[in-house]
Amino acid sequence: MRRAIPLVFLFAALPLEAQRQPYAPTSLSVEDYERAERRLGAQTQTLVYGADVRPTWLDDGRFWYRNRIVEGEEYVLVDATRRLRGRAFDHARLATALGTAADTTFEPFALSLSALEVTRDGRSLTTETRHGRFTCDLQAYRCARAPAGGRGDPGRALVVSPDGRLAAFVREHDLWVRDLDTGQERRLTTDGQKDFAYATNNAGWTKSDRPVLLWSPDSRKIATFKHDGRAVGEMVLASTNVGHPRAEIWKYPLPGDSAIFMIHRVVIDVPTATVTRLNMPADAHRSTTCDHIVCGGRWADIEWTPDGTRLVFVSSSRDHKQAILRVADATTGAVRDVFEETEETFFESGFRSSNWRLLGSTDEVIWYSQRDDWGHLYLYDLNTGRLKNRITAGSWNVLDVLRVDEASRTVWFLGVGKERGDPYFRYLYRVGLNGGDVTLLTPDSADHTVSLSPNGRFIVDSWSTPVKPPVAAVRDARGRQLVVLQEADISRLVQSGWQPPIPFSVKARDGQTDLHGLMYRPSHFDSTLAYPIVNRIYPGPQAGSVGTRSFVSSRSDAQAIAELGFVVVELDAMGTPLRSKSFHEAYYGDMGDNGLPDQVAGMRQLAQRHPWIDLERAGIYGHSGGGFASTGGILRYPDFFKVAVSQAGNHDNRVYEDDWGEKWHGLLERGPDGSSNYDDQANQSHAQNLKGKLLIAHGTLDDNVPFYSTLLVVDALIAANKKFDFILFPNRRHGFGNEPYMMRLRWDYFVEHLLGAKPPEDFSFGRQRVTSQ
């Protein structure tokens, strides 16, 4: 007779998961590190084919793109109207023809063409190569040198007028124009001066010779500003070299400074060189989206009316809480406020690019707002400032307005969170300006990157997930698939031992909100062992740890570190974008939070779910904001994180540029005792908590996050008598994090102090040869 065994005793009879053997090799070999190196992007990307379709649209509605193939790179021409796809030319014959014309040698699948114009009948093309510009007969395959692109490429330092005749540029603090036919140059302004120049964007860590301006549609006027930094404080860096160091000194405002960059808006009549100053106070150097006034290469938050008589723009307050839509008369400079929107935390008009749009034919404005906790579109009357109707609604976000057709009163946009599944997947939608049903145009459950044809008739759609490679196709304006362009081939990548990351979800600190991330395990993973866990962190607030939800063969060195014997996790915590406004502003005013409560909570849940995670061996690393967060992690959670690697961290936002801290933490306020609302966010304020192993690194010429921020932490750790490791990279800017030496230090640090193993002594990157066989 069988006796029932109580379930509790049955569980007690099983081995305790906490007792499972840790993965703890005594040493790692050169071969172990070389296996990890093979998981870096420089080696995995060469094993992926047909994954990157970036169309260049031609004037007649066709487009071409480069496609990676086993032999190298091919050029594909697509006629969406006729549903035809094929190579744009015979690559071998064109290579021979170009080589003859240029008196050099071209390889058929390594042509490196930077431009391509194919005639409608397909009988000839014009292209740019590193040896010049050529026109080629595709019947006889003969090429001849062509004049440099019409009026020539004006370069990055010039902005060409809509009619293509003039190019504006800055010289000696003033704005000039050059006639692209004759080369004649003419000065438009005369009162520019150092730190009070026209059209410049040399602000904080942004430095560019390209003027910031907007030509009117008729090419007769230029909207720009005088950029006032005269009273702004300076940042100083010095080179490391034999002899006297070279000093770099430039204007760099900080939170709490009495003077920040201001812009005095003007309109310049080009034929007469008349400067009209807008009748309004100077605006703070702010935009409604990115750090600076130039977002994605474009001056943000300003548009001309179609007739060029008025400017429509947004003024943002210093603290980013207030946005005022304004209209200016381009002739008189008179300015009228249309309406304003104010947030308790920060106002944004989109994700990385502004989503408001002027409808010039009807004097209306599409406005973007998160007033109901989600990012949506609203239609306003430009003359009265009255809300006419809501365009979109629901518990999801409009992400990026791609096209507005005023004739059909239709808008196309990318959105997130509306479909089931991963809330970060982007989809393309269409909706009428009067509201109503939102039409999904890209139905596949995946992350979509899209390009719309200039006439709006066609959509190039590429979709993928972190675990599924891309498929690219042409769709019509209704979303119907017309032509499959590519289905990515990752067979050689898989044969190399590659494995995809593992998507996961956990609950946030509140126990209710879903968080999403990716997890990486070693290819030699053994489920009977317990592995140290490493958190690769970027805290936002403008981005998260995971990054794109599209397919990529490698995500920095996350999989590479996993190969050394770790479980690596990336988690998008609260305080990052693309979810609700309340999610995004979760730690507004408390930047030292850095989403760390969610990271710790998520890692605890993963360890409960997966007994092969050893939570007693937890590490963390990151760069820039991730450097801030990783140091904060080991100082604020000293009993949880045992090892941290911190690179280029903005450890105290009082010594980082003003528009960053003042947007995400608020304006600096001091109490009667001299304390401020910025004190706790500073990592040096928690230096006394260090228990584990900390490696801090910075570049001495980092003009984004100056290394003084790291030295404040170093000084506090010394004062607290704490042991730590510290390295400065001489003459490095902000992006040294994936230099071979830094990467080797990072790997060694985790191997030695978290895994408890000895790293190989004679490993160096790049010694192995990786083939695609």
Image (cartoon, rainbow, N blue to C red):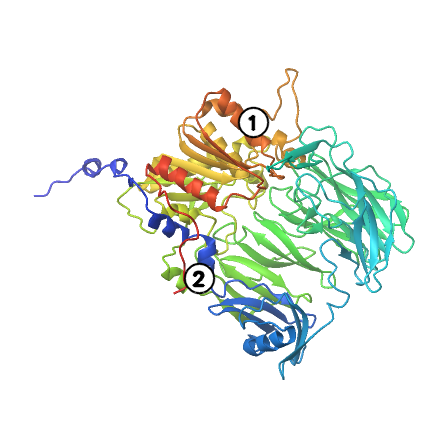
Q: Residue furthest bottom?
A: 140
| Mark 2 surroundings: few (<14), some (14-19) or many (≥20) residues within 10 A | many
Nearest the eye: 687 or 131: 131
Q: Residue furthest left?
A: 1
Q: Residue furthest top?
A: 673
Question: As drawn, is 360 to the left or to the right of 665?
Answer: right
Q: Which residue is mark 2?
A: 47
Q: From the viewer's perspective, is residue 743 above or below residue 88?
A: above
Question: As drawn, is 23 to the left or to the right of 201?
Answer: left
Q: Position of residue 79 (x, y in %)?
A: 61, 74
Q: Which residue occupies 44% across, 40% down?
A: 745
Nearest the eye: 724 or 320: 724
Question: As drawn, is 311 to the left or to the right of 349?
Answer: right
| Mark 1 surroundings: few (<14), some (14-19) or many (≥20) residues within 10 A | some
Q: Which residue is mark 1?
A: 712
Q: Quadrant of the C terminus?
A: bottom left
Q: Position of residue 559 (x, y in %)?
A: 41, 49
Q: Quadrant of the N terminus?
A: top left
Earlier sequence position, callout 2 versus callout 1: 2
Q: Which structural element holds mark 1? A: helix
Disc 2 and disc 1 in contact, CB within 8 angstroms: no
